[in-house]
């Protein structure tokens, strides 16, 4: 007598695999968007830390001029952002490995410089919207701190 799987056993295994796939695939796409948001949170925290360090460095030198620019080109795509402090002749960088701006104006999950001292993060489609941050009074703050998008990046 041959040992083999019956047709019922094979169908049962295929159904179980199908159910697991239906559960797992949406979780993987949500995980990717969560990772993008976590990366943006980390970028905000790193910028704030670097900004604080630069302010302290300048104060120790007796320079009290406010920082109003963190690098990048307004409206430019696929160029480095957060790469330099304004008025810094020593070459101190905001981030050692600055992210690039969105590859195109329709991209999501990326940063763009949208004004002289404004930086916008465009959330992935599953979350939607954007959060606008500005450099003001030596701080990197969200313009609308009560918005859902700002709260996502600041908690």
Image (spheres, rainbow, N blue to C red):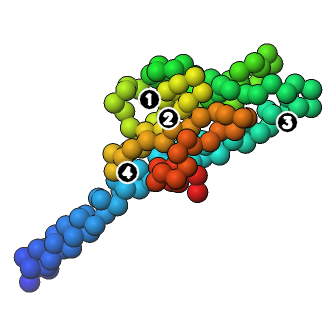
Q: Residue 44 placed where, x, y %?
A: 61, 43
Q: CA distance from mark 1 to mark 4?
A: 17 Å
N-term-proximal mark, 1 vs 2: 1
Q: Secondary structure at mark 3?
A: helix
N-term-proximal mark, 1 vs 3: 3
Which residue bears the numbered disc 2? 120
Residue 103 occupies quadrant = top left
**Mark 1 in CB contact with mark 4 (< 8 angstroms):** no
Badge number at residue 102: 1
Mark 1, residues whose alpha carbon is within 10 Å: few (<14), some, or many (≥20)? many
Q: CA distance from mark 2 to mark 4?
A: 15 Å
Q: Is 52 above or below relative to 18?
A: above
Mark 3, residues whose alpha carbon is within 10 Å: few (<14), some, or many (≥20)? some
Taking the spot 69% from the left edge, 30% from the top edge, the residue there is 94
N-term-proximal mark, 2 vs 3: 3
Q: CA distance from mark 3 to mark 4?
A: 36 Å
Mark 2, residues whose alpha carbon is within 10 Å: few (<14), some, or many (≥20)? some
**Mark 2 in CB contact with mark 3 (< 8 angstroms):** no
N-term-proximal mark, 1 vs 4: 1
Nearer to us in this view, 79 or 113: 113
Nearer to us in this view, 43 or 22: 43
Q: Residue 57 placed where, x, y %?
A: 86, 32
Taking the spot 37% from the left edge, 26% from the top edge, the residue there is 105
Observer-side mark, 1 or 4, equals 4
Which residue bears the numbered disc 3? 56
N-term-proximal mark, 2 vs 4: 2
Taking the spot 25% from the left edge, 64% from the top edge, the residue there is 21
**Mark 1 in CB contact with mark 2 (< 8 angstroms):** no
Badge number at residue 59: none
Which residue bears the numbered disc 4? 127
Residue 71 occupies quadrant = top right
């Amino acid at each position: 007598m041959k040992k083999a799987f019956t047709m019922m056993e094979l169908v049962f295994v295929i159904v179980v695999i199908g159910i697991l796939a239906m559960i797992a695939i949406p979780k993987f796409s949500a995980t990717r968007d969560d990772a993008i948001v976590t990366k943006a949170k980390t970028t905000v925290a790193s910028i704030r830390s670097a900004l604080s360090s630069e302010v302290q460095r300048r104060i120790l030198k007796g320079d009290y001029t406010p920082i109003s620019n963190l690098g990048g080109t307004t409206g430019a795509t696929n160029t480095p952002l957060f790469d330099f402090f304004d008025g810094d002749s020593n070459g101190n960088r905001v981030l050692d490995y600055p992210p690039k701006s969105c590859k195109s104006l329709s991209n999501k999950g990326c940063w763009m410089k949208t004004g002289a001292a404004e930086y916008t993060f465009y959330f992935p489609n599953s979350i939607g919207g954007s959060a606008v941050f500005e450099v003001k009074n030596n701080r990197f703050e969200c313009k609308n701190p009560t918005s859902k998008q700002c709260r996502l990046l600041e908690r």
